[in-house]
Amino acid sequence: MSHQSIAYHPEHNHSHCIEQALAQARELCKARKQRLTAIRELVLRLIWQSHQPLGAYDLLPALAEAGFNSAPPTVYRALDFLQTQGLVHRIASLNAFVGCPSPEHAHDGCFLICENCRTVVELDAGSIINQVQTEAQALGFAVRQQTIEISGLCPNCQNPGQSSDS
């Protein structure tokens, strides 16, 4: 993962990030013969508005403002679809969702969660995931799904007012 793709990096282009995520979602859904409906696309856009996790109830006002049914089942159905397609991840500790930067392939998540600004960054942590699988198998445990959530402080919150490059 390049440093410029990390959400708290000073040169991160968030507008490009959002548009790239939406374009990729459209392509993947088309290739998978799945419908990225207007409401599903709006929910995905809202989730990508920041790299801070959003809960279902955080999304309801924006859905109502856009003229969609803003009942909780509506947003939960959209989130379920997006999660099934690998377009978003659920951050269990926060009961919230973030966009997935690599939805083209199925993978378990490893997330760095800033306790201060709530920015979430997904790591490509295949070696960590593999180690957990190996240890679990050695104990006879059959892992079905795993998510690793690590909380701490991002560079910006560790050093307010300073660039993360210093």
Image (cartoon, rainbow, N blue to C red):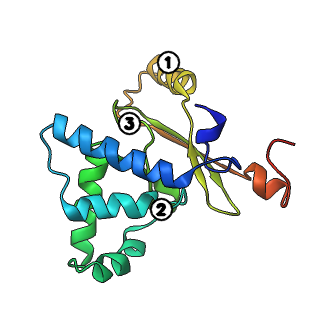
Mark 3–mark 1 CB contact (< 8 Å): no
Mark 2 or mark 1: name the one nearer the start of the chain: 2
Q: Residue at x 12, y 39 (%)?
A: 33
Looking at the rendered structure, the secondary structure element under dot 3 is loop
Mark 3 or mark 2: name the one nearer the start of the chain: 2
Residue 162 point in image, percent of width and height: 85, 54
Looking at the rendered structure, the secondary structure element under dot 2 is loop
Q: CA distance from mark 3 to mark 1?
A: 14 Å
Q: Nearer the viewer, mark 3 or mark 2?
A: 2
- Per the image, the residue denoted by label 1 is 134
Image quarter (top left, top right, bottom left or bottom right) of the C terminus: top right
Residue 47 vs 60, above or below: the answer is above
- Per the image, the residue denoted by label 2 is 49
Mark 2–mark 1 CB contact (< 8 Å): no
Q: Residue at x 37, y 27 (%)?
A: 142
Image quarter (top left, top right, bottom left or bottom right) of the N terminus: top right
Residue 89 visible, this angle:
no
Which residue is at the far left? 33
Q: Amino acid at mark 1?
A: Thr
Q: Nearer the viewer, mark 2 or mark 1?
A: 2
Q: Amino acid at mark 3?
A: Gln
- Per the image, the residue denoted by label 3 is 145
Q: Residues within 10 Å of mark 1 (few under 14, many from 20)?
A: some
Residue 35 point in image, percent of width and height: 14, 50
